[in-house]
Amino acid sequence: MSEHKERLELPAPEDARDDKPTLELDSTMKMDNLGPMIVNSDGTLSRISNWQEMSEIERARTVKVLLKRNKIRLDTLEAAETGRHEGTEEKGKDIETE
């Protein structure tokens, strides 16, 4: 009753694709095919899911809008963070002077 089934194995490392990118320490890599990063209002990052299907005109318009919106959101988040730190420092001063 024992049947001989063919074993499926992964390729050996030397048989693996040679065209995969490598990244050295302190180097950068562009991932343009993934599309631009979106800064969400809570500071998290995301990407556009249909970037690959967009035409060049759609991509250019999207990038233009995202650059402006991301800057506004980053400035808002930075101002909120700065205000939070300044409020903490002021509270500390009040305690020290009392």
Image (tube, rainbow, N blue to C red):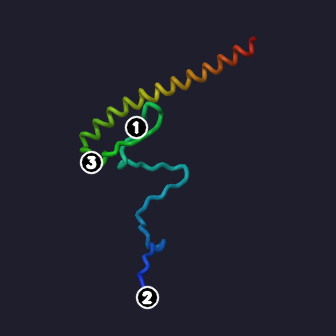
Q: Amino acid at mark 2?
A: Met
Depth check, front residue: 54 or 24: 54
- Which mark is drawn over residue 53? 3
Q: Quadrant of the C terminus?
A: top right
Quadrant (top left, top right, bottom left, bottom right) of the N terminus = bottom left
Please state which amino acid type lies under the numbered disc 3: Glu
Residue closest to the far front: 1
Between residue 83 and residue 32, name the one nearer to us.
83
- Which residue is tagged 1? 38
Say which mark, if any, is on residue 21.
Answer: none
Q: Position of residue 95 (x, y in %)?
A: 72, 16
Q: Quadrant of residue 58?
A: top left
Q: Residue furthest bottom?
A: 1
- Of marks 1 and 2, which one's residue comes earlier in the chain? 2
Q: Which residue is mark 2?
A: 1
Cα–Cα gap, marks 3 and 2: 52 Å
Residue for point 55% across, 26% down: 81
Q: Position of residue 78 (x, y in %)?
A: 51, 27
